[in-house]
Amino acid sequence: MPETKLPIEIKADRRVVNQYLAAICVNIISLSQGTAIGWLSPFLPLLISTDSPLSTGPVTDIQATWIASLLCVGAIFGTLLFGWSADKFGRKFSLCIAALPLVGFWACVAFGGYVEILYLGRLLAGLGAAGVFLLVPLYVTEISEDRIRGSLGTFFILFINLGTLVSFVIGTYLSYHITSYILIFLPILFLLCFIRFPETPQHLIRCNKIESAESALKYLRGYTSSPNHVMALKDEMSKLMSQISIRGKDSSDDSSIKWADFAPFATKKAIIIGIVLVALNQLSGCFALINYTAQIFADANTGLDPNVSAMIVGGIQIAGSYVSTLVVDRCRRKILYIVTTFGAAVGLTAMGVHAYLKVNEFDVSVISWLPVASLSFVIFIASVGMLPLTFVILSEILPQKLRSFAGSLCTTFLWVVSFIVVKYFPVIVEVLGMHGCMWTFAGCCAFGVFFNAFFIPETRGKSIDEITLAMGNRSKNES
């Protein structure tokens, strides 16, 4: 027995190599998107200063909020576009198209000297974000085996965060224009690397391209021509084909979405959970805090250079995302989400306490480190669980037929909430104070703890069929 176990384990490990390579290469576009998100933090103070690189001079406070929030506007419309494209032309083709707006964004930064060009660039960055946030988790979910689906899914936020840190570092030490000249090559690198990987087997089956689906699955699973592998390939293909409506020449109605597809309790529950999850993802305040990181630390008078503080936060964010890849398939996802969301609530509460003491003219010099420490903790703990698990769980609980449509619906709502939070973050701070704003975010995180505990099923290690069955248990009990 000991002699036979080791080779079997080695073969099992070799089966996932191509899945890891595909997940890493597709997430190069997540890295590029992260740089577009992180770009604002080091350069917003420059844009509003007298040293602004724009020909029109410094941007106003109102223009600054539009520069920050127009990414969300572009993403709102782009999500609907890419949701349609993913079903019409495939996940792979749509991902390649999503790289083009990111090239356009960096071109606008590099060669546009007017605030209106920056507006256009941020809209293009939003179009790219729509494709990235919708399609990368979708692609990774569909190519992954159940046992590693969670780990591969966390690469998404890891690469987003890595891109954010890259922007913080390059934006601190290089000029406004040189930064754009360098980062414009990331979406091009994605296209060069990703083009060799296959379309997802699920989409190919749906389009009745059975031979191509078999080839894709054979490549992704590392199957050889051995009898055992041939049998395993046939079994997995048979299972996928039983789950998916095939779109033939005369049967397109079979795969079209109908109102009846939304009738099952499991489907309605999945969509509601998805909408709440993406709303909590943004109402945690993490995305807004990343956009305004340097400015927050400047206002806090911590004594640290604001951009250095932002880099510290970015590095800790990477550490949290890396820890997430290690624990997401080892811990129950419900527990991981609850613990990390509660931790974020504690950190945000501490930030609010510091801001409250400062605004009431208490001497906070002894705890001047608290904003940096609290925000670092919030970003770290959220990156371990709450932020990546939003997209992992969302891609797992949505039914196969509606995954693209319902995913685009939830992602659109994510960007609507994100726009409101980012656009009006300065207004909220002015009305409620920084302390009130942080406590509001903390309250949303606290709600997330209870929502997850009572409404979200455990998905770790389960197949999509098992998750769907778990989602529909209530309807069976009621009938």
Image: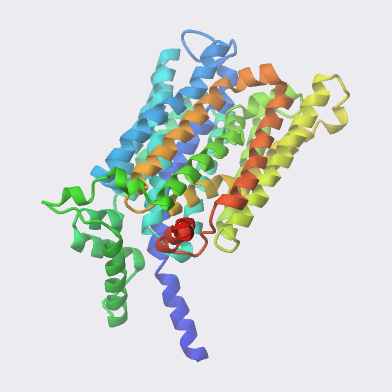
Residue at 61%, 36% (x, y): give it.
284
Q: Is residue 319 above or below residue 78?
A: below
Residue 6 horizontal/vertical position (percent): 49, 83
The quarter holding residue 348 reads top right
Residue at 50%, 23% (x, y): give it.
69
Q: In this view, does 435 lie above or below 479?
A: above
Quadrant for the C terminus in the image: bottom left
Instruction: Answer with left or right where residue 38 lies relative to residue 186.
Output: right
Residue 304 horizontal/vertical position (percent): 74, 29
Judging depth in this view, the residue of 27 and 247 nearest the camera is 247
Residue 363 horizontal/vertical position (percent): 88, 24
Residue at 26%, 77% (x, y): give it.
225
Instruction: Answer with left or right where residue 336 lies relative to residue 271.
Output: right
Q: Is residue 185 visible?
A: no
Outermost left residue: 250
Residue at 59%, 49% (x, y): give it.
452
